[in-house]
Image (tube, grey):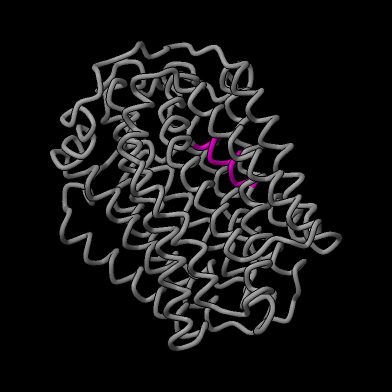
Amino acid sequence: MPADIIAAPSASARALFRHRPFICFSLGRVFSTLAYQMGAVALGWQVYALTHSAFDLGLVGLWQFIPMAVLTFAAGHAADRYERKQVLQLCQLAEALIGIVLAWGTFGHWLTVHEIFAAVVIFGGARAFGSPASAAMLPGVVPEGLLQKGTALSSGALQFSTIVGPAIGGFAYAIAPGAPYALMAGLWIVACLLNGAIQMDRPVAPKEPPTLKSLFAGVAFVRQNPAILGTISLDLFAVLLGGATALLPIYARDILHAGPWGLGILRAAPAMGALLTTALLTRYALNRRVGMRMFQAVIVFGLATIVFGLSRWFVLSLAALAIMGAADTVSVVIRVTLVQLATPDAMRGRVSAVNFLFINASNQLGEFESGFTAALMGAVPAAVLGGVGSVVVALLWMKLFPTLRNVERLE
């Protein structure tokens, strides 16, 4: 275990707010996530408005996942070999450029669904390189001994953006369909500048040259660590089956009759629950039975997904989504901290790439699975079935990975 990230009992989370690298890093994530969440609302609504097809809505997730799957291992090696903040900046510049093109096409009324899918592919490629680099940067921008609280605060920053971003995206789209894309481009440029201002506490020097062995070293490392394998694969299968958020445009338009503003609020609800949970985790760190807590959180996530799927009442749907976000945050904080504590710094980019691949397989393929299932049997059965699947996976993984279930502390 790397000595520089072992939790220190006397460490204070207040030190994070006075630490410039962490502040720049977190603000960069805030603006970048704001842009991404605004795009998720605008792209989802625009695709459904153009096609009225649940299947095409699911394709948005699939087209994001394909470049991620193809590029992930090269992206992980890039995060370990080159300066991580520069990798992240290049990705954000590429995303800003695509945002400008989407705004231009929407204002000019020439943007088609196929061109939207092409833009989504480029977004997926940029995220494939940017996310492992960003995840691997986190331990290097927090003061020593504060990784769990730094993870919780960073997650809170993301959740704040996930609350505000969809609402801004929905309202901006209601004013002018091209407005969210123009705002996205500006936010990605700001994020790029903030990341450029980061001075790493523990920078990573260039490592071994790219070989097949080094390229897939992250996969070998994960396979040799049952707790990490169980943690990452639990997220893959639980969220893959519980991807009800992909159906939010259908729920907002056809079931809850809420319009684009309602879609923005629905997309923000999980992040609101997550942000409140993050505030608690920042003040009261998880320090016992953390493995079991992670499984319990996934089960709660699945049950809340079932409630959301059956709800016809907007307020109840919001509450269910908020509980989903709260449960997911507990799982994320435990999972990220466990993986970072067990991974040496020289491997963090490649292990983060494997983790990123699993997470986005669950998110993007989960969106495709939900869209495909909804096209076959309807949105409500698809959402309910996904929630049941998440609960079953959590119970099964408790049996398959007893070492992970019995993890007592994050240290």
Please tell me which residue lies in front, 369 or 388. 369
Where is residue 33? Give x, y as percent.
61, 43
Q: Is residue 289 visible?
A: yes
**Above-or-below relation of 116 to 142:** below
| Side (left or right) of 167 relative to 381 | right
Horizontal relation, residue 103 to residue 76: left or right: right
In the displayed orientation, state which residue is furthest to the bottom. Answer: 377
**Residue closest to the far left:** 224
Q: Residue at x 27, y 26 (%)?
A: 347
- Quarter of the figure with the C terminus: top left
Q: Residue at 51%, 41% (x, y): give it.
A: 281
Relative to 122, residue 4 above or below: above
Is residue 77 magenta-colored?
no
Q: In which quarter of the view is residue 93 placed?
A: top right
Q: Residue at x 40, y 71 (%)?
A: 369
Q: Position of residue 63 (x, y in %)?
A: 46, 58
Which region shows up in magenta? Answer: 152-161
Residue at the front extreme, as displayed: 110
Instruction: Name the image quarter holding residue 25.
Output: top right
Depth check, front residue: 160 or 110: 110
* Residue 213 pos. (x, y %): 15, 30
Is residue 253 positioned above or below 245 on the image? below
Residue in view at x 59 percent, y 62 percent? 322
Residue 342 at x, y percent in the picture: 26, 31
Q: Considering the whole magenta stretch, tell me its main secondary structure.
A: helix
Q: Tell me the quarter of the picture where residue 80 sits.
A: top left
Q: Is residue 316 visible?
A: no
The N terminus, quarter of image: top left
**In the picture shown, does residue 81 fall above or below 327?**
above
Front-lying residue, 187 or 393: 187
